[in-house]
């Protein structure tokens, strides 16, 4: 990397390297990488733009930029991703939280408010970084928040996020509902399970290449885990309680059909901001 004089010049250089590498938002990501390399936030980077960049800052920025140009997700390089109102730590052990999942949070908040109980019991299955349950607990502190994940490494990340945010969530290790006794029941169950078909070419592109395959892909053309959740959740839903699922943009008809077949009532899908049917809700049979 050629010597650069000022932080502004370094920023421009990062931007042009990211652009050449085909990164869609090179200006934003250049600021994020320079922030990580210098410890300065955006306002400080502007205020100190004409300061000379130290050799150490140049070296660090160069290393981060090389990783990004090689395709590593910006969330992994920074170790962070914004979701809902939260700044979450993320690692290669969990799915990187996606903006479309905020629709599931909005819907779950509605379901929590509708249940009419003082301390609704809310369960997030396959919590990953903890994004969904932490957003719900942050918005509705009186809920009793519980989450499971099969992956101990993902749970470590979720617990670390809960600690940093000071949010009280019970995290249990196990696949889907395996950690529960028959009498455990919830007012709301929510999940963003893996739902991509194992052969889908998207798995070999972009950020998805760096995320755990078991957090992304599911058998039966991507529907296998959704079907498992639909079939098993009723055992742990209180009467009249809903199951809320995120799914692929073209899976809503299959998810609705399976819910109907399992006897769920008031089955409905909602569209994400991109116009895709992204979540489906049904009430316990
Ligand atoms: N929505 C993610 C994607 O398509 C997948 C998340 C998931 O499988 N739950 O990239």
Image (spheres, rainbow, N blue to C red):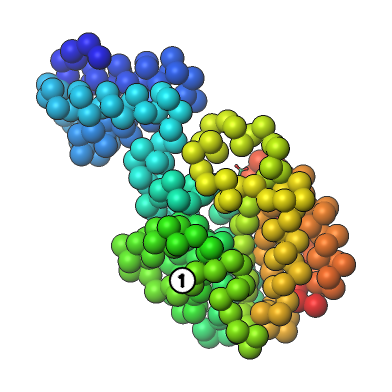
Crowding at label 1, few (<14), some or many (≥20) Cα neighbours within 10 Å?
many
The residue lying toward the viewer, choosing from 281 and 257, is 257
Report x, y in % for residue 110.
62, 68
Report x, y in % for residue 36.
26, 37
**From this viewpoint, which residue is outermost toward the bottom?**
183
Please count the marks in the image.
1
Instruction: Relative to 263, say whether 129 is above or below.
Output: above
Give me the residue at 73% from left, 76% from top: 234
Give me the residue at 33% from left, 66% from top: 163
Report x, y in % for residue 100.
59, 48
Report x, y in % for residue 116.
61, 83
Give me the residue at 70% from left, 66% from top: 229
> In this orientation, does residue 158 appear?
no
| Residue at which label 1 appears | 171
Dot 1 falls on a residue whose secondary structure is strand
Give me the residue at 77% from left, 51% from top: 220
Write down the quadrant of residue 164 in the picture: bottom left
Write down the quadrant of residue 168 in the picture: bottom left
The residue lying toward the viewer, choosing from 26 and 194, is 194
**From this viewpoint, which residue is outermost toward the top?**
2
The residue lying toward the viewer, choosing from 194 and 191, is 194
Instruction: Relative to 232, say whether 276 is above or below.
Output: above
Instruction: Relative to 181, say whether 63 is above or below.
Output: above
């Amino acid at each position: 990397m050629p010597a650069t004089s000022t932080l502004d010049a370094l920023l421009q250089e990062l931007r042009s390297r990211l652009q050449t590498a085909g990164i869609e938002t090179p200006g934003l990501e250049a600021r994020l990488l320079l922030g990580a390399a210098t410890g300065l936030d955006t306002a400080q980077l502007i205020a100190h733009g004409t300061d000379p960049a130290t050799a150490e800052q140049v070296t660090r920025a160069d290393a981060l930029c090389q990783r990004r140009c090689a395709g590593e997700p910006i969330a992994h390089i920074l170790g962070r991703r914004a979701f809902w109102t939260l700044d979450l730590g993320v690692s290669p052990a969990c799915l990187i939280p996606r903006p479309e999942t905020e629709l599931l949070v909005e819907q779950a908040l509605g379901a929590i408010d509708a249940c009419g109980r003082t301390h609704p019991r809310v369960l997030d299955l396959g919590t990953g970084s903890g994004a969904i349950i932490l957003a719900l607990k942050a918005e509705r502190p009186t809920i009793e928040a519980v989450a499971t994940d099969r992956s101990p490494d993902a749970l470590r990340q979720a617990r670390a996020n809960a600690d940093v945010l000071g949010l009280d969530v019970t995290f249990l290790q196990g696949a889907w509902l395996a950690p529960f006794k028959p009498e455990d029941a919830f007012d709301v169950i929510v999940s963003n399970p893996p739902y991509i078909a194992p052969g889908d070419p998207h798995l070999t592109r972009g950020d998805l290449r760096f995320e755990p395959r078991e957090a992304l892909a599911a058998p039966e053309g991507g529907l296998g885990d959704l079907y498992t959740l639909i079939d098993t959740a009723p055992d742990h839903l209180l009467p009249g309680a809903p199951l809320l699922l995120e799914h692929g943009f073209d899976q809503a008809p299959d998810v609705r059909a399976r819910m109907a077949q399992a006897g769920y009532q008031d089955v409905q899908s909602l569209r994400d901001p991109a116009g895709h049917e992204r979540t489906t809700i049904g009430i316990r049979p």
